[in-house]
Image (cartoon, rainbow, N blue to C red):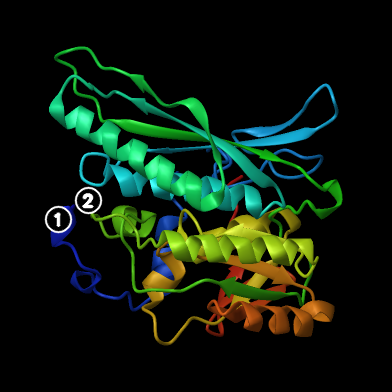
Amino acid sequence: MTKIFEDDGFAVEQIQEPKNVRDVVYSLITNPNLAPVNYFNDFTEEGPILEDIAVDEGGLFTTDSGQKLAMTTHAFDRHLETSPQTAIEILITRATRRLVCYGIRPVAVSAFLYHLNIGDPKGDKIAAAAKKGMERAASAFGLQISERKIRFDCSPAGRNPSATLIVSMMGLVENINKILDHKLKKKGNNIFVIGESVNDINSSEYLEFHCGIPNSPLPYFDLDKEVRMIATVRQLIDRQLITSANPIGRGGLFFSLMRAAMPMGVGFDITTDAEIRKDAFLFGESMGRGFVGVPQENFDRFVDFMQEQRIPFFAVGHVTSGEIRIDSESFGFIDKMKVH
């Protein structure tokens, strides 16, 4: 049965923590929005095209001068009436994280608001707040904004489709030798989560698809923490301490790990955080987090560097030859979890 909560009336405590994580995993595997198990879906959680790097809805382009440019596009159709400024800040942050995790420097951003009547006071308010959020996020990440800032597609009178925000971002490939892909590479490599884990399941696929709650607040988000986390990932790539980097996005940590594990046919063995609800830790989509693959030979240097950064990080587990394990419980093998 679908449950409805107002945005300001929902709290994670209203959802009983699942007793069987396996049931949640196999429920969410059937969700068409989770790309790792449905290859008919788009690949919005993958990365830019670069030789054999995974496909994205944007891709990589080469100018006449030989300069390589990357592009990524993200869309959002929720919370634009209630929290338009935060919504666009989250979208710009997601796009920035995506490019940075591939070793690409984001440089410019543009936005498009579809189905918005700016002649209506409500539409004008959304547009003004979105503009403010765009300027704030662009300033935080050092991005240029396209000349017209936010473009509009106004809906005719009498039509009320949901307003939708689309953000496009361009980035520069500064060093082709420091480009990463999203894939977990090798059995035994360490997996570290970077960023703060919180008890948050807001606006997640888990909350909507498994728990039946389509309306909830935006996920936890702190722009200042995002800036520090993304800067840290950039330095890790520059120092060549990691072999892959991924934002924790749609489907939470578990499905982000699945997307990283499937291309190479590897698995992962992870331990959840005892201080965080398992559903929030594994399936929550709170912002400000990513995970990286660290080869054993870089372990000490990685830890030393991260301790200097003074941002949360912890070893969540390691790469396996194909088995998926959570808290010592086997969930089977990666090749059995694909949709053929």
Disc with the residue nearer the chain's start (1 vs 2): 1
Q: Are marks 1 and 2 in contact (CB under 8 Å)?
A: yes
- For label 2, the residue is 215
Question: What x and y, as percent, mark residue 224?
Answer: 45, 63
The residue drawn where x is 14% and y is 55% is 5
Residue 258 at what x, y percent from top left? 59, 60
Name the secondary structure under disc 1.
Answer: loop
Q: Which mark is residue 251?
A: none
Res 111 quadrant in image: top left
- Left or right: 145, with 68 as reference point: left
Residue bearing mark 1: 5
Q: Specify the quadrant that holds the C terminus.
A: top right
Residue closest to the eye, 210 or 286 = 286
Q: Is residue 129 shown above or below 242?
A: above
Does residue 15 appear in the picture of this structure? Answer: yes
Quarter of the image with the N terminus is bottom left
